[in-house]
Amino acid sequence: MQTDEGKVIDKDGAKIAVYKDETGKEHLLSAVCTHAGCIVSWNSNDKTWDCPCHGSRFDKMGKVIAGPAITDLEKGK
Ligand code: FES
């Protein structure tokens, strides 16, 4: 994966959203949307995690930027 990009991976049966920052460090989040449990996907244009179900959006570190979700993505393991 290139730097400043993200992707969803399977890890121990869980969907994990991995963001690789500009220094190459990986930041892991749960890819499960905190609204109703759909799996977010990486938006490489805006560098966000977007949910396909109802349009919630999270920044690359998982912070909510658009609802209906009101809770940030959980930290991954
Ligand atoms: S489940 Fe993600 S916006 Fe509803």
Image: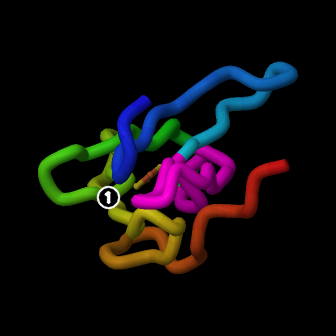
Does 10 appear in magenta? no
Answer with left or right where residue 14 lies relative to residue 69.
right
Q: Quadrant of residue 42?
A: top left
Residue 55: percent from left, percent from top? 28, 55
Query: Which residue is at the far left?
Result: 45
Residue 2, above or below 9: below
Q: Quadrant of the N terminus?
A: top left
Does 29 appear in magenta? yes
Q: Secondary structure at mark 1?
A: strand
Mark 1, residue position? 48
Q: Nearer the viewer, residue 33 or 21?
A: 21
Which residues lie in the magenta part?
A: 19-35
Residue 77: percent from left, percent from top? 85, 49
Residue 36: percent from left, percent from top? 56, 51
Residue 76, above or below 8: below
Q: Nearer the viewer, residue 59 or 5?
A: 5
Tell me what residue is drawn at x 77 percent, y 25 percent: 11
Q: Residues within 10 Å of mark 1 (few under 14, many from 20)?
A: many
Tell me what residue is drawn at x 52 percent, y 50 percent: 24
Q: Quadrant of residue 64?
A: bottom left
Tell me what residue is drawn at x 27 percent, y 57 percent: 47
Q: How many marks?
A: 1
